[in-house]
Amino acid sequence: MEQTPFTPQERVESLKAGGLSASGAILVFMILLVINEWLAQWPIAVSKLPESWISLSGSLASVAISGLLFGVTYRYAIRQDTNPQLKSGVVLAFSLVRGLAQIDTGFGITDTVLPFVLMAVESWVVFSCDRIILDQALQRGWLKPFATNQPAP
């Protein structure tokens, strides 16, 4: 019988990666919101903080879920690989999916797409920071990379 690489220990490590990534995504998103609020006093402002707690909670939930899924996927995708193109590809894939959805929404509700393009760039910043956080956690041994070679039963 073939042994699956998805052991309970691997699942725990994936949850740790997802939790760390979700936490990092929320932190980076909040920092970007504060920076954006500061920029709101200048003529280049594109948006402000969400005006209601419900809107802010929805944004935070979306970022947290995206971060969690990114962390789990990133750990699985890179395994023990040090290929920077693979790592960047995972970041770009998640950034494009989230960012293009935001741009598409922008096209549907307004003629001004610049705020939505900036939100897409924001997604790239969030996932890039998550990559740095996860890479550091893997290097320091806080997370274990996904094992590609399982011992024979």
Image (cartoon, rainbow, N blue to C red):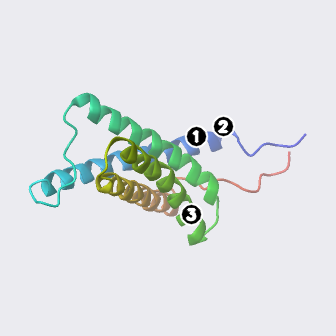
Residue, far front: 111
Q: Which residue is mark 3?
A: 89
Between tags 3 and 2, which lies in front? 3
Say which residue appears at 56% left-offset and 54% top-offset. 74
Tags 3 and 2 touching, CB below 8 Å = no
Instruction: Tell me: residue 17, above or below residue 133.
Output: above
Say which residue appears at 42% left-offset and 58% top-offset. 133
User: Observer-nearest residue: 10 or 93?
Assistant: 93
Q: Mark 2, residues whose alpha carbon is within 10 Å: few (<14), some, or many (≥20)?
A: few
Percent position (x, y) of residue 100? 46, 52
Tags 2 and 1 touching, CB below 8 Å = yes
How far apart are the alpha carbons under marks 1 and 3?
24 Å
Percent position (x, y) of residue 148? 73, 56
Between tags 1 and 3, which lies in front? 3
User: Observer-nearest residue: 1 or 81?
Assistant: 81
Image mark for residue 49: none
Image mark for residue 12: 1
Tags 1 and 3 touching, CB below 8 Å = no
Say which residue appears at 38% left-offset and 49% top-offset. 25
| Residue 23 in sight | no
Position of the C terminus by quadrant: top right
Q: Which residue is mark 2?
A: 8
| Residue 75 in sight | yes
Instruction: Tell me: residue 80, above or below residue 13.
Output: below
Identity, as a three-letter code, of the amino acid under mark 1: Val
Percent position (x, y) of residue 113? 33, 53
